[in-house]
Amino acid sequence: EPEVTQTPSHQVTQMGQEVILRCVPISNHLYFYWYRQILGQKVEFLVSFYNNEISEKSEIFDDQFSVERPDGSNFTLKIRSTKLEDSAMYFCASRDRGSYEQYFGPGTRLTVT
Amino acid sequence: AQSVTQPDIHITVSEGASLELRCNYSYGATPYLFWYVQSPGQGLQLLLKYFSGDTLVQGIKGFEAEFKRSQSSFNLRKPSVHWSDAAEYFCAVGATGNKLVFGAGTILRVKS
């Protein structure tokens, strides 16, 4: 069964450093999403992406964040200058056209020290 | 704005007992509703979904949920809980732009 994959599973970085979180969505899916879950809190929407542009972003997704689909398979989330409060589990999700069902990856745990 | 409320932060049930996890949503139109399960350190697995039609939907692992428009609810049920069901359960509504809005989650503990 096709699945969304994410790398790395755990990333530790120092405050102020740039990080790139990588996702490989399901191959025929067209809509891509990033969510995050701070430890002990609910899953929050960050950004949605379709047709090589951002469809919608939350207020969390400020100028420090960016997304990119650099090739036909990867979908990345970049945080330019990490802060302590960026420590969270980041989930990538994808869905097909005509379906409302989002498939989630296993997540990347980001720890900012 | 769309929102989801899961009133129970923790629930403990005995193995073999029945389970009901509550979910209330706020959404102006006909909602798309989902239940996801998350085991410790794992990702989100879709249990079941409601888009339209029959208000009682069946999912994986023996779970079912009932959509009640009059109560704005989408409660998750299972007739007999297994120890492996211990996890955190999230209710979500598909909101404008098709992003998902999640509830705060309910942690299920199963005692033997």
Image (cartoon, coloured by chain):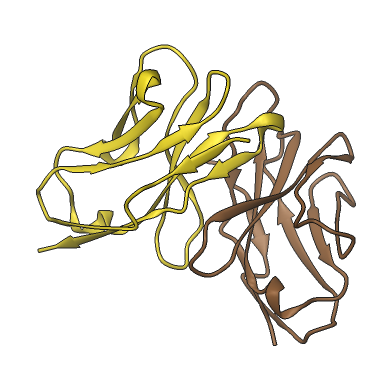
Chain colours: A brown, B yellow
Please tell me which residue is depicted at 71% across the width and 45% down the height of the picture. Answer: A33
Q: Give the image location of residue B1, x and y in percent.
A: 63, 35
Q: Is residue A77 left or right of residue B59?
A: right
Q: Look at the image and tell me whether residue B99 can be seen.
A: yes
Snapshot quadrant of residue B77:
top left
Give the percent coordinates (x, y) of residue A72.
Answer: 84, 44
Relative to residue B3, is residue A71 drawn left or right?
A: right
Q: Left or right: B88 with respect to A43?
A: left
* Residue drawn at (68%, 30%) of the image: B96
What is the x, y in percent for residue B72?
41, 27
The residue positioned 89% from the left and 39% from the top of the image is A52
Counting every numbered tag in the picture gives 0
Q: Quadrant of the C terminus of chain A?
A: bottom right
Q: Is residue B58 above or below residue B111?
A: above
Front position in the image: A76 or A80? A80
| Foreground residue among B91 and A52 | B91
Where is residue A54 shown, x and y percent of the image? 85, 42
Is there any visible trace of residue B63 in the rendered image?
no
Q: Nearer the viewer, residue A24 or B42?
A: B42
**Which residue is painted at 76% across and 33% down in the image?**
A30
